[in-house]
Image: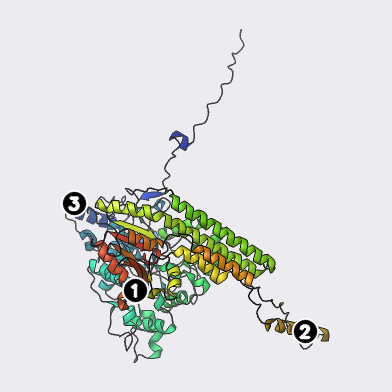
Amino acid sequence: NNAAKVTPPQPKAPPPPPPEDRTGGVGETIDTFASYNPTALPNDIVEALNAAHTGSAFTLQKTAHPEIIELSDDDDDDESDNENKGVGSKNDSTSQPHLELTCPSHTSLACESALLSSVRAPQVPIAAAECLLELAKKGALSPLQLESVLLAIQRHNRKFDGMRAGFFIGDGAGVGKGRQIAAILRDSFCRKGHSRRHVWLSVSQELVQDARRDLTDIGCYAQVHDGTQFLNKKHGLGISDKGVFFCTYQLLVSQHRIDEIVNWCAGINTITKKSDYQRLEHEFNGCIVFDEAHKAKNLKQDTRTAQLVVRLQRRLPNARVVYCSATGVSDVGHMVYAERLGLWKTKGTSQANFSLFESFNSFQKALEKRGLGSLEMLALEMKQQGSFMARTLSWDGAEFETFRISLNEKQQTVYDLCVKWWIDVKRALEEICDSVHMRANPPGRTLWGTFWSAHQRFFKELAICCKIPVLADDAKKMVAEGNCVIFGLQTTGDASMQNILANGGHLQEFSTLISSSQNIMSNFLQSHFPVAPLPMEAPPLPEEPGVNAPQYQRELYLLMKAQADTIANMPPPGIVPEFVAKRDALLARIDSIPLPPNPLDDLIDRVGGVDQVSEMTGRPGRIVRKSGSFAYAKRATGDANDRINLVEKRLFMDGKKPYAIISDAASTGISLHAARGS
């Protein structure tokens, strides 16, 4: 009776269901992006922006502009920033908490990756905003844009081993990278002691109009020189010409071009002494902007353009460099041009105490060894140093819908006929390869690689063509309801069209639109289908024996060389009629398959023709309807061809054309955003 009562063990409660079970199989949202708040702005500037938003009065206290700061590996950016703000300043983050911005940080909701939002960029001194704060108060610059501009201005006040530090704008589309670049240039124009010459490099000469617009919108009316015209002046760049020199990376094709640009920046002319060249180049402190900087990423492949981009930075070591790209830190191998970030030692400098890495190769190997996480840590470190910002527009309010399009009976028939045709081509190739013993040889492997490449391109094109009827009908309904429609394309099929036009097709009229998928089939047969055995390959020759080699080695080498020469001089094998018959039979079957037309031309024709569609692509011409038939027509002629995409963009934005089609080749720098409230 006195024994303790033992309670039998109770079964453990089952673990809670995983998140996706608790939400009915839908799953929980993972917060990969956080709403953006510009924390690098000091409290005085935040107060001024908040007051401007509410219509209140606020007077900003003046402070001295910071001097140039020489960086080393022992420098603490946060400490140097606080020193620049002055003792007892309201900006000092140690004296009071950071104020929250009550006005919108941008014209649209913006966000930042959750990882990047976990760290703060160093606060900028008030003096950095003295030329731009009024613009932000009036709305010409959003607080988000102002923050990165001020960080760039502050970063340019730092040097490492004789080279001025650079800044990287990694914002996504719609944040306004062009407006930020313009603000950086405007600030430099306004400051005493800064150069009145600046260089803006981009990917398309059409973007010079956008550069002029962005500068004008923030009240900077400096002259913008079009590089294609300015570099062709009789006397080159004039020393009296000041402003912004805008050119493309493609124009950097020779040392002569680089010399012209550097001489203009440095103020070097024909009467300048050569002994003064280096001094003037080192004294230049204007801005060099590398817009869409990822276009210079092929430095490791030793492309001419990439090498000249780096050479331009090295010849003007005191220039204020800005890199601008939405894909800046997505691949460490693409950062090779960004020497001014100070992440590795550069050629011609003696950064004994600044960088941990002796070269870009050692920097790249260290990061690649640690995997994708190292790139995230790199972005965090760059943001903390004040050399990198990356924001993007929020997708809040955007709607996405995936359509599953069922093939109609005609499309199913076409698809089945195409599958059978490609199977028969594969069988014919196998028979020919086996008969001439080339399947395992290098030429045979090349042939099969070409076959599967054409096979993949064909069915990708066919799948796109099958979507066009449904897509066009849905777009017309949208326009009838008062909307405008934008179509996005990766390719236009122009290469296939050019193959047809090369044979005189531009002089013909067609009863129907040209089929780009049909051209893929016929082009493979005509260009790659073997109609004769491959010529015999000469055996590889060993290295020629030296004069001291034994006699038998020299005789053996001469014998092998004679055999190789005999094989090389043999006439090519003759055409095999059986192979030709197989090819011709396959070619004839193509005409019996009712293949759909080029999807881009078909889409334009279905929604009303070129009068209703603004086409922004890289192709020079298209097939258009003319009195019941079709013919090839150029999109523009002469100099207008370089501006045609801008003209089409304006027609769409002005509401004169309800449809817009934009391809990957023409998308850079073109914005088709709707005005809020319209």
C-alpha gap between disc 1 and disc 2: 60 Å
Q: Position of residue 385 (x, y in %)?
A: 41, 61
Query: Residue 195 falls in which quadrant of the image?
Result: bottom left
Q: What is the number of the mark on residue 239?
A: none
**Would you place residue 26 above or below residue 109 in this image?**
above
Front residue of this view, candidates 239 and 625: 625
Give the structural element (helix, strand or loop) at label 1: helix
Front residue of this view, candidates 1 and 244: 244
Front residue of this view, candidates 496 and 168: 496
Residue receiving disc 1: 205
Query: Residue 340 falls in which quadrant of the image?
Result: bottom left
Q: Earlier in the sequence, mark 1 or mark 2?
A: 1
Give the structural element (helix, strand or loop) at label 2: helix
State which mark lies toward you, 1 or 2: 2
Crowdedness near tag 2: few (<14), some (14–19) or many (≥20) residues, C-alpha within 10 Å? few
Q: Amino acid at mark 2?
A: Leu
Residue receiving disc 3: 54
Q: Earlier in the sequence, mark 2 or mark 3?
A: 3
C-alpha gap between disc 1 and disc 3: 41 Å
Q: Amino acid at mark 1?
A: Gln
Q: Position of residue 11 (x, y in %)?
A: 56, 23
